[in-house]
Image (cartoon, rainbow, N blue to C red):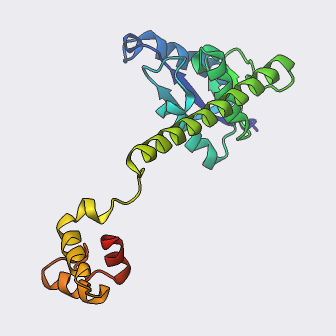
Amino acid sequence: MAKQRKQAVGYIRTSSASNVGADKDSEKRQRAAIERFAKGRFEIVAWFNDPVVRGTDPIETRPGFSALLDRIEGNGVKTVLVEDASRFARDLVTQELGILALIRRGMTVLTANGDDLTDGSDPSRTMMRQIAGSFAQYEKARLVAKLKAARDRKKAETGKCGGRKPYAEIRPDTVAIAKRLKSDGVSYRKISAALAAQGHTTARGRPYVASAIQAMVN
Protein backbone atom coordinates (compact mmCIF):
# COMPACT_ATOMS: atom_id res chain seq x y z
CA MET A 1 0.00 0.00 0.00
CA ALA A 2 1.42 3.38 -1.06
CA LYS A 3 2.36 5.73 1.70
CA GLN A 4 -0.07 8.63 1.96
CA ARG A 5 1.60 11.94 1.17
CA LYS A 6 1.30 14.94 3.45
CA GLN A 7 -0.67 17.90 2.16
CA ALA A 8 0.97 21.25 1.47
CA VAL A 9 0.27 24.56 -0.21
CA GLY A 10 2.58 26.30 -2.66
CA TYR A 11 3.48 29.99 -2.54
CA ILE A 12 4.83 31.95 -5.51
CA ARG A 13 5.90 35.59 -5.71
CA THR A 14 7.00 37.57 -8.76
CA SER A 15 8.42 41.04 -8.23
CA SER A 16 8.08 42.54 -11.71
CA ALA A 17 5.25 42.82 -14.22
CA SER A 18 7.73 41.65 -16.86
CA ASN A 19 7.84 38.29 -15.08
CA VAL A 20 4.07 37.81 -14.99
CA GLY A 21 2.09 35.94 -17.62
CA ALA A 22 1.67 32.52 -19.21
CA ASP A 23 4.74 33.01 -21.41
CA LYS A 24 7.01 34.28 -18.63
CA ASP A 25 9.64 32.22 -16.87
CA SER A 26 9.58 33.22 -13.20
CA GLU A 27 6.24 31.76 -12.16
CA LYS A 28 6.73 28.59 -14.22
CA ARG A 29 10.23 28.11 -12.81
CA GLN A 30 9.08 28.51 -9.23
CA ARG A 31 6.14 26.15 -9.70
CA ALA A 32 8.32 23.53 -11.41
CA ALA A 33 10.94 23.68 -8.64
CA ILE A 34 8.30 23.30 -5.94
CA GLU A 35 6.61 20.42 -7.77
CA ARG A 36 9.93 18.59 -8.19
CA PHE A 37 10.60 18.83 -4.47
CA ALA A 38 7.02 17.82 -3.58
CA LYS A 39 7.02 14.73 -5.82
CA GLY A 40 6.66 11.66 -3.64
CA ARG A 41 6.65 13.79 -0.49
CA PHE A 42 3.69 16.16 -0.57
CA GLU A 43 0.34 16.58 -2.26
CA ILE A 44 0.00 20.26 -3.20
CA VAL A 45 -3.65 21.03 -2.51
CA ALA A 46 -3.59 24.76 -3.34
CA TRP A 47 -1.39 27.44 -4.90
CA PHE A 48 -1.14 31.05 -3.77
CA ASN A 49 0.45 33.71 -5.92
CA ASP A 50 1.51 37.32 -5.35
CA PRO A 51 2.28 38.74 -8.80
CA VAL A 52 4.10 42.08 -9.06
CA VAL A 53 4.92 42.12 -5.34
CA ARG A 54 8.40 43.20 -4.32
CA GLY A 55 10.39 41.09 -1.89
CA THR A 56 10.53 44.04 0.49
CA ASP A 57 6.75 44.59 0.53
CA PRO A 58 5.31 43.85 3.99
CA ILE A 59 3.77 40.41 4.34
CA GLU A 60 0.46 41.81 5.61
CA THR A 61 -0.05 43.83 2.39
CA ARG A 62 0.16 40.81 0.10
CA PRO A 63 -3.25 39.51 -1.02
CA GLY A 64 -1.87 36.10 -2.01
CA PHE A 65 -0.18 35.57 1.34
CA SER A 66 -3.30 36.78 3.19
CA ALA A 67 -5.38 34.24 1.26
CA LEU A 68 -2.80 31.58 2.18
CA LEU A 69 -3.19 32.39 5.87
CA ASP A 70 -6.98 32.21 5.57
CA ARG A 71 -6.72 28.80 3.95
CA ILE A 72 -4.25 27.18 6.33
CA GLU A 73 -6.06 28.40 9.43
CA GLY A 74 -9.10 26.34 8.55
CA ASN A 75 -8.12 23.16 6.70
CA GLY A 76 -5.35 21.52 8.72
CA VAL A 77 -2.55 21.91 6.13
CA LYS A 78 0.65 22.56 8.03
CA THR A 79 3.28 22.94 5.28
CA VAL A 80 4.05 25.81 2.89
CA LEU A 81 6.40 25.19 -0.04
CA VAL A 82 8.41 27.97 -1.73
CA GLU A 83 11.16 27.94 -4.33
CA ASP A 84 13.65 29.59 -1.97
CA ALA A 85 13.80 32.10 0.87
CA SER A 86 14.14 35.07 -1.50
CA ARG A 87 10.81 34.21 -3.14
CA PHE A 88 9.22 34.41 0.25
CA ALA A 89 10.84 37.79 0.90
CA ARG A 90 14.14 39.42 -0.02
CA ASP A 91 14.26 41.77 2.96
CA LEU A 92 15.45 39.80 5.99
CA VAL A 93 13.13 41.49 8.51
CA THR A 94 10.14 41.08 6.17
CA GLN A 95 11.10 37.44 5.62
CA GLU A 96 11.39 36.66 9.31
CA LEU A 97 8.13 38.46 10.18
CA GLY A 98 6.29 36.38 7.59
CA ILE A 99 7.88 33.16 8.80
CA LEU A 100 7.11 34.14 12.39
CA ALA A 101 3.44 34.58 11.42
CA LEU A 102 3.44 31.00 10.11
CA ILE A 103 5.36 29.57 13.07
CA ARG A 104 2.72 31.02 15.39
CA ARG A 105 0.14 29.06 13.39
CA GLY A 106 2.12 25.83 13.76
CA MET A 107 3.29 25.87 10.15
CA THR A 108 6.46 24.60 8.46
CA VAL A 109 7.97 26.48 5.50
CA LEU A 110 10.16 24.39 3.19
CA THR A 111 12.16 25.50 0.18
CA ALA A 112 12.58 23.48 -3.01
CA ASN A 113 16.04 22.54 -1.71
CA GLY A 114 14.56 21.06 1.45
CA ASP A 115 15.66 23.91 3.71
CA ASP A 116 13.30 24.35 6.67
CA LEU A 117 12.87 28.12 7.08
CA THR A 118 10.89 27.59 10.28
CA ASP A 119 13.61 25.52 11.94
CA GLY A 120 14.05 26.77 15.50
CA SER A 121 17.33 24.97 16.22
CA ASP A 122 19.46 27.65 14.55
CA PRO A 123 20.35 30.28 17.20
CA SER A 124 20.97 32.99 14.60
CA ARG A 125 17.52 32.48 13.06
CA THR A 126 15.90 32.50 16.49
CA MET A 127 17.67 35.76 17.30
CA MET A 128 16.62 37.32 14.00
CA ARG A 129 12.99 36.37 14.60
CA GLN A 130 13.09 37.91 18.04
CA ILE A 131 14.55 41.10 16.58
CA ALA A 132 11.98 41.13 13.78
CA GLY A 133 9.14 40.57 16.24
CA SER A 134 10.41 43.36 18.49
CA PHE A 135 10.76 45.67 15.49
CA ALA A 136 7.17 44.94 14.42
CA GLN A 137 5.90 45.68 17.94
CA TYR A 138 7.89 48.92 18.01
CA GLU A 139 6.47 50.01 14.64
CA LYS A 140 2.94 49.20 15.80
CA ALA A 141 3.40 51.17 19.03
CA ARG A 142 4.95 54.07 17.10
CA LEU A 143 1.98 54.17 14.70
CA VAL A 144 -0.52 54.12 17.57
CA ALA A 145 1.36 56.97 19.28
CA LYS A 146 1.52 58.93 16.02
CA LEU A 147 -2.23 58.58 15.42
CA LYS A 148 -2.99 59.59 19.02
CA ALA A 149 -0.79 62.68 18.70
CA ALA A 150 -2.62 63.64 15.51
CA ARG A 151 -6.01 63.23 17.22
CA ASP A 152 -4.88 65.26 20.23
CA ARG A 153 -3.57 67.99 17.91
CA LYS A 154 -6.86 68.16 16.04
CA LYS A 155 -8.84 68.23 19.25
CA ALA A 156 -6.70 71.09 20.60
CA GLU A 157 -7.21 73.05 17.38
CA THR A 158 -10.93 72.41 16.82
CA GLY A 159 -12.20 71.26 20.19
CA LYS A 160 -13.19 67.90 18.76
CA CYS A 161 -11.76 64.92 16.96
CA GLY A 162 -13.92 62.39 15.18
CA GLY A 163 -17.13 61.08 16.69
CA ARG A 164 -20.61 62.35 15.99
CA LYS A 165 -20.94 65.85 14.55
CA PRO A 166 -22.78 68.38 16.75
CA TYR A 167 -26.36 69.40 15.96
CA ALA A 168 -25.19 72.96 15.28
CA GLU A 169 -23.16 71.59 12.37
CA ILE A 170 -25.65 69.15 10.87
CA ARG A 171 -28.97 70.87 11.79
CA PRO A 172 -28.25 74.61 12.16
CA ASP A 173 -31.87 75.67 11.39
CA THR A 174 -33.25 73.26 14.00
CA VAL A 175 -30.77 74.45 16.61
CA ALA A 176 -31.60 78.11 15.91
CA ILE A 177 -35.32 77.51 16.52
CA ALA A 178 -34.65 75.45 19.66
CA LYS A 179 -32.40 78.14 21.11
CA ARG A 180 -34.95 80.89 20.41
CA LEU A 181 -37.73 78.92 22.08
CA LYS A 182 -35.54 78.11 25.06
CA SER A 183 -34.67 81.77 25.50
CA ASP A 184 -38.43 82.40 25.74
CA GLY A 185 -38.59 79.93 28.63
CA VAL A 186 -40.22 77.05 26.72
CA SER A 187 -39.63 73.56 28.19
CA TYR A 188 -37.62 70.90 26.35
CA ARG A 189 -40.74 68.79 25.79
CA LYS A 190 -42.65 71.69 24.25
CA ILE A 191 -39.63 72.68 22.14
CA SER A 192 -39.57 69.13 20.78
CA ALA A 193 -43.28 69.31 19.92
CA ALA A 194 -42.84 72.71 18.27
CA LEU A 195 -39.92 71.48 16.19
CA ALA A 196 -41.85 68.39 15.10
CA ALA A 197 -44.80 70.56 14.06
CA GLN A 198 -42.44 72.50 11.77
CA GLY A 199 -40.96 69.32 10.29
CA HIS A 200 -37.79 69.27 12.39
CA THR A 201 -37.51 65.62 13.46
CA THR A 202 -34.87 62.91 13.75
CA ALA A 203 -33.64 60.93 10.74
CA ARG A 204 -36.35 58.38 11.57
CA GLY A 205 -39.07 61.03 11.56
CA ARG A 206 -39.56 61.07 15.33
CA PRO A 207 -39.63 64.09 17.67
CA TYR A 208 -36.36 64.85 19.43
CA VAL A 209 -36.03 63.58 22.99
CA ALA A 210 -35.38 66.06 25.81
CA SER A 211 -31.66 65.21 26.03
CA ALA A 212 -31.25 66.02 22.31
CA ILE A 213 -32.96 69.40 22.77
CA GLN A 214 -30.71 70.08 25.74
CA ALA A 215 -27.62 69.30 23.61
CA MET A 216 -28.86 71.71 20.93
CA VAL A 217 -29.42 74.68 23.19
CA ASN A 218 -26.29 74.16 25.27
Give the number of marks.
Answer: 0
Locate the C terminus and report the quarter of the image it occupies.
bottom left
In the rendered image, residue 51, in percent from the top left (x then y), is placed at 43, 22
Which residue is at a point 61% across and 15% down the rendered structure image?
A: 91
In this view, which residue lies farthest toward the front?
184
Locate the N terminus and report the quarter of the image it occupies.
top right
105 up-or-down from 213: above or below: above
Where is residue 109, by image quadrant? top right
In the rendered image, residue 139, in percent from the top left (x then y), is placed at 62, 30
Asked if residue 169 shows in the view, the reply is yes
5 up-or-down from 180: above or below: above
Front position in the image: 216 or 23: 216
Which residue is at a point 68% across and 27% down the rendered structure image?
A: 135
Horizontal side of 24 relative to 188 (left or right) equals: right
Front position in the image: 212 or 71: 212
Front position in the image: 144 or 150: 150
Asked if residue 118 shows in the view, the reply is no
Where is residue 177, by image quadrant? bottom left
In the rendered image, residue 205, in percent from the top left (x then y), is placed at 22, 79
Horizontal side of 138 relative to 46 (left or right) equals: right
In the rendered image, residue 11, in percent from the top left (x then y), is placed at 56, 27
Which residue is at a point 31% across and 85% down the rendered structure image?
A: 188
83 up-or-down from 136: above or below: above
In this view, which residue lies farthest toward the left?
198
